[in-house]
């Protein structure tokens, strides 16, 4: 596609509910990133994929967070048993390159509110 | 741990003013520094800087990197209300996966 596409754009979840956030990266982009951005903060790294391989998940805040990219394109970030502190914008980004410092392109984010 | 500090955190100016946004960093094996503009949607790419002292320019925006002093500045001249946004700075390291670390951003408000 033309850009990184994320869905849903907005999600309100009741505390304890599971949510799934989808990211469709730019076609052909090898690298895919998930970031979490709380209000008034910069994006915080969650996890990184190179094709289908999850090479770094050091930023996932707890074992309630799980991400996958089974065919090396679309990725899903799942949050189980949501809690209020999970309320944030979840940004997905993709990049053409594997290791070099190419530009990463962001989607518009999935705004999650846990009530 | 990689660290990116932006200042000021917020700035309010009037149209026509010139602003300078700062980004300092600590990173092992620096590879590049990125500037993004974030309105109420996706952060949009502005500049990537890899070499010291070479200014990058796009219209009224310009940026420069100082790898010795470990900082970058983003200048916006003749500001317009459309420049109101959060400006994010990120740095990426070489070796292994390239995963940019972001600062908190500078919130810029331009009043007419």
Image (tube, coloured by chain):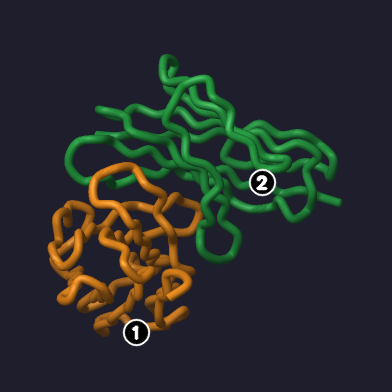
Query: 10 Å neighbourhood of mark 1: few (<14), some, or many (≥20)?
Result: some
> Residue B69's image quarter?
top left
Tell me the shade of chain A: orange
> Where B28 sits versus B58, above or below?
above
Front position among marks 1 and 2: 2
Figure quadrant of the N terminus of chain B? top left
Query: 10 Å neighbourhood of mark 2: few (<14), some, or many (≥20)?
Result: many
Residue most extreme to the top: B68
Name the one closer to the observer, B21 or B74: B74
> Gap in Å between the C-alphas at discs 1 and 2?
34 Å
Q: Is B35 left or right of A104, judged from the image as shown?
A: right
Residue most extreme to the front: A28
Residue at figure coordinates x 78%, y 43% from the top left? B79
> Residue A82's image quarter?
bottom left
- Say whether residue B8 is visible: yes
Q: Chain of mark 2?
A: B
Q: Is B82 left or right of A102, judged from the image as shown?
A: right
> Residue B39's image quarter?
bottom right
Which chain is tinted green?
B
The x, y position of residue A12, in whole percent, is 42, 83
Residue tagged 1:
A14
Q: Is A68 left or right of B58, judged from the image as shown?
A: left
The x, y position of residue B96, in whole percent, is 17, 41
Residue at figure coordinates x 37%, y 47% from the top left? A102
Which labelled disc corresponds to residue B108? Answer: 2
Residue at figure coordinates x 33%, y 57% from the top left? A96
């Amino acid at each position: 596609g033309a850009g990184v596409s994320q869905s849903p754009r907005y999600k309100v979840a009741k505390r304890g509910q599971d949510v799934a956030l989808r990211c469709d990266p730019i076609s052909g982009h090898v690298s895919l990133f998930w970031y979490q951005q709380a209000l008034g903060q910069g994006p915080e790294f969650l996890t990184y994929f190179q094709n289908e391989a999850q090479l770094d998940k050091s930023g996932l805040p707890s074992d309630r967070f799980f991400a996958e990219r089974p065919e090396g394109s679309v990725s899903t970030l799942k949050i189980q048993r949501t809690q209020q502190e999970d309320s944030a914008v979840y940004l997905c980004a993709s990049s053409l390159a594997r290791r070099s410092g190419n530009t990463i392109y962001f989607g518009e984010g999935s705004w999650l509110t846990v009530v | 741990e990689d660290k990116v500090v932006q200042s000021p955190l917020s700035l309010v100016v009037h149209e026509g003013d010139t602003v300078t946004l700062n980004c300092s960093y600590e990173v092992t094996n620096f590879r590049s520094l990125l500037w993004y503009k974030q309105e109420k949607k996706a952060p949009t790419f502005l500049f990537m800087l890899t070499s010291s002292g070479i200014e990058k320019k796009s219209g009224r925006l310009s940026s420069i990197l100082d790898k010795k002093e470990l900082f970058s500045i983003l200048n916006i001249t003749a500001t317009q209300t459309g420049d109101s946004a959060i400006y994010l700075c990120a740095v990426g390291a070489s070796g292994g996966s390239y995963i940019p670390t972001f600062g908190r951003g500078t919130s810029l408000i331009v009043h007419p």
